Amino acid sequence: MGLVAEFEIHCEGLPLVGVARTLPEASLVLELQFNHGRRPLFLVTVNGGATTAIADALTDADDVGEWCLVGRAGDTRRYQVHPAFSLEEQLGEHLDDLAGLEALATADAIIERIEVCPQGWRQTGWFADRQEFRQFASFWQQHVTFRLERLTDDDEARAAGDGLTDRQGEALRTAYELGYFDIPRRATLADVAAELDIAASSVSERLRRAQTRIIEETVAPTWPPLPD
């Protein structure tokens, strides 16, 4: 069964991250056209921001060669951008394993959305199985910050935590709103139990089960096996 993953790759060397940093009021979505040799053509959709500011950011960016405005509809603009470097050249100072980067292109995965952010890329991708995703995540974890936001089976895309029971969700929300998870804590387990009118041991069990479920759906799939 395939998986759908939403994640962030924090790396300032990724293409157009510098552009996104200079345009905090705009959102940038990037499509890579890999049929253009070792320098894939960029199709960039920009929502928000002033046209002149976007033009200045693209012109001043070190990793952008030629670019042109293809079309516009309201606050949405579409640009065609020729990168100044190949991905290997662009990321050479940030990644030690360029062969591993190239191997990702042959993985059984489809990256369907890349949102360019000031700290890196936020992506949504489809992966053939859990092993394919682990290999993908492991590569980025070895070099930069990789943050998984959501991982679901491809036939049941849902928000992380949707697998909680109603009682687990109620306990988690009550504990959060009372300040049980704050540092320092503003509420005790007894306070949460009193609010829910149940025993403290029941609250503890519901919170542990809820936290385990969320961990299993988010960060756990990216962890390498523990050493024997």
Image (tube, helix red, strand yellow):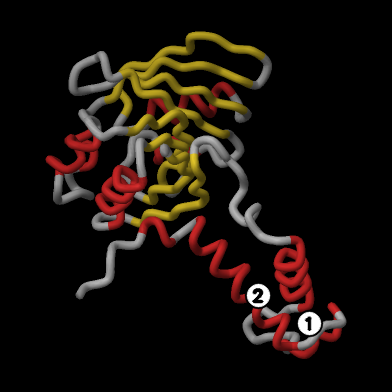
Residue 73 - label: none
As drawn, 42 above or below 61? above
- Nearer to me, 71 or 102: 102
- The kind of secondary structure element at disc 1 is helix
Confirm whether residue 64 shows in the render.
Answer: yes
Q: What is the crowding at mark 2: few (fewer than 14 residues within 10 Å), some, or many (at least 20)? A: many
Discs 1/2, front: 2
Say left or right for 127 vs 51.
left
Q: Which residue is mark 2?
A: 207
What amino acid is labelled 1 in the image? Val
Q: Position of residue 170 (x, y in %)?
A: 77, 67
Q: Position of residue 153 (x, y in %)?
A: 49, 42
Answer whether labels 1 and 2 touch (C-beta < 8 Å). yes
Tell me the kind of residue under disc 2: Leu
Quadrant hosting residue 48: top right
Looking at the image, residue 100 sits to the left or right of residue 174; the answer is left
Give left or right: position of 180 versus 61: right
Q: Tell me the distance, in whole angstroms, between the alpha carbons under discs 1 and 2.
A: 11 Å
Camera-nearest residue between 224 and 50: 224
Up/down of 24 relative to 48, above or below: below
Label 1, residues with CA under 10 Å away: few <14, some 14-19, many ≥20 = many
Which residue is located at x 36 percent, y 47 percent?
130
State the residue position of label 1: 192
User: Residue at (18%, 35%) from the top-left corner?
Assistant: 102
Q: Quadrant of the N terminus?
A: top left
